[in-house]
Amino acid sequence: MDQVTLNCAELTTREVNAALAALPDGSRARILEPWGRHNLAVGLVNRITVEIEGNAGYFIGGLGDGPDVVVDGFVGWSAGENLMSGTVRVRGNASECTGASAHGGAVIVEGDASSRAGISLKGGTVLVGGDVGHMSGFMAQAGVMLVGGDAGHALGDSLYETVIYVAGSIASLGSDARAEDLTDDDVLTVKQLAALAGFDHIDPENVTRVASARQLYNFDALKDQRY
Amino acid sequence: MTELSSEALPTPGLRNGAARHPAPALPMDARRASHSYPPEAIAQIQRMAEEGHYEIRGWGAKRKLPTFDDLVFLTASVSRYPLEGYREKCETRTVLGTRHATKPIELDIPITIAGMSFGALSAAAKTALGRGATAVGTSTTTGDGGMSEEERAASHLLVYQCLPSRYGFNPADLRRADAIEVVIGQGAKPGGGGMLLGQKVSRRVADMRTLPPGIDQRSASRHPDWVGPDDLRIKIEELREATSWEKPIYVKLGATRVVNDVKLAVAAGADVVVVDGMQGGTGATQDVFIEHAGIPTLAAVRQAAQALREIGVEDEVQLVVSGGIRTGADAAKAIALGATAVSMGVAPLIALGCNSRTYLRGGVEHDVTADYHALGTEPGYCHHMHTGRCPVGIATQDPELESRLDPDVGAQRVVNYLKSVTMELTTLARACGKSDVHNLEPEDLAALTIEAAAMAGVPLAGTSWIPGSP
């Protein structure tokens, strides 16, 4: 198994990403001194493991289709955006739009995620150990979110088919989002998701399931301009 | 004034103001329309009172606006000499994306096909546009809904849009595109998101967009993963990183605050800025957006060119202009005002057969006037793309309707049309003494109206006066 170390203090983003893209499947790469660098490990299609040792910027692991990216620090906006497969794990907190439009794979934040986590989700999985900010799950189309802490205002606004599980409190639900009864399948799903993320503080039988009421799916003048 | 009995007047409250009984011939002053409330405004108010929501339709602005028709060319005479009109070479080759991309787009003509989605358009229409564009050496563009296999196969040069909805957006398609267009806005609805009503959301369209079939798809108006120009710079870098900095990145703007928006797009790293004026078309949106948001293309192109000059990148960043471009004259005027190329959407659809009374299948013309009537319209007036019931198989997902468009027939019509437009363009350029269409310049133009002179920044014909200039 190849193992490389790439130091952001010495390399441009282009050089780092080109080096990562050239690695054969099964390789492992360490990225040192990221110092908030944006766009690290984006667009990768190889099955490699990338460990970013420190805080990183926007779009970490974005547009990925295969790699497992771990950030041992905090990240900026849109970690794992448009992820197709693989994982992006953030050991600290994440800023806005975590996992935006992810089609597959899993984006895991062990700390808190800011506003609009899981926005426009399209089949991916977003797992947040702590809290999420307002408008999380906005227009999420498919896939699943698990929030280990509390959710901010307007959770799941204009939801389509994504299901959101929240272990803590929900400040408010957005338009067309509703809390639904938890089924045995939901409990099993939450158990599996928590295990995948390594979240042992979530009781799968004590989460709130949020899904679309599907009242805004077709244009209707009687909806009082709610959309 | 002649007194009228109430029975003789149209009954108020009927849909579109239709009379219950035909009105008898009336004196002239009895038919005097109100300027503030003409029959169209009355009908619109009545429709809203009945239905309780805004009108949704396709096409583009229908109101009268200042256009390129308000400009004329000052072709050569004694002070300048023309190129021989039929024989001398006039270069049309156009290169887009020379700023940062290692593989710029090379076009044979400065006329491209604008972004239109599979979903809004049928697969047959996308295929025909792709084949036609390829045959004349230009590019087509995907739309809100991703890249279809037919489209990729048909289009030698394909621009892949990155839209707020991200429907079907896939890094694999990103890599097999020839250029990337980050869509901030659209001339028909700047500030608004896309719309595809449920009747056009077939199983295939729904699957490509990861949504249930049959629902009304109202796309986001803002990107899900960034906001503002500083973020856009990082987003563009992400797209470049994911494609090894090979592909040109366009930024498409709906024309509103053009000068500032163009400068910010350039600052964010755009290779190409696309400015779409308010005459730009759409598959579906609110009529109030189409008619009341944005500025005319004529004004937008001059402002965009000015913005590039003010920051000194007019030779580095290419400007593509769209929105109501129909002819070689329109293209020539846009290029003279500073565009490197133009992009067209509605016009090539018309070339395909949009608003035609007939469609051709098996060498036989089939009349579909009745289908237009079923939509409440006539050939030549149809803006009913939003219904999915396109009588000529272009703006539909209905298999029977789609079968009315033969992609080979359509492609040939697109070829004929684009060749004709190019011939018009080079004819005007030669008459202005230009051996390259890109050498057309504002000095070659005069305006027929004060409004056009002010918007385009060229003198009113017969004067040296440019309104607003010192």
Image (spheres, rainbow, N blue to C red):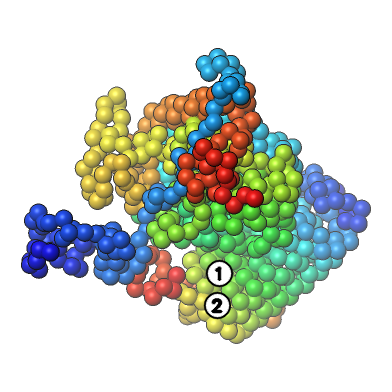
Pointer 1 or 2: first along the chain? 1
Callout 2 crowding tier (Cα within 10 Å): few <14, some 14–19, many ≥20? many
As drawn, the residue found furthest toward the front would be: B463
Please give the name of the residue rendered at 24% of the width and 38% of the height, measured from the top-left corner: B368
Residue marked by disc 1: A138
Residue marked by disc 2: A154
In the figure, is residue B353 to the left or right of B136?
left
- B304, above or below A175, in the image: above
Please give the name of the residue rendered at 55% of the width and 53% of the height, measured from the top-left corner: B255
Disc 1 residue type?
Phe
Q: Chain of mark 1?
A: A
Q: Chain of mark 2?
A: A
On the image, the x and y values in percent for residue A153 come to 58, 80
Residue A5 lies in quadrant:
bottom right
Residues behind callouts 1 and 2 on a single chain: yes
On the image, the x and y values in percent for residue A138 come to 55, 69
On the image, the x and y values in percent for residue A33 come to 89, 61
As drawn, the residue found furthest toward the top would be: B87
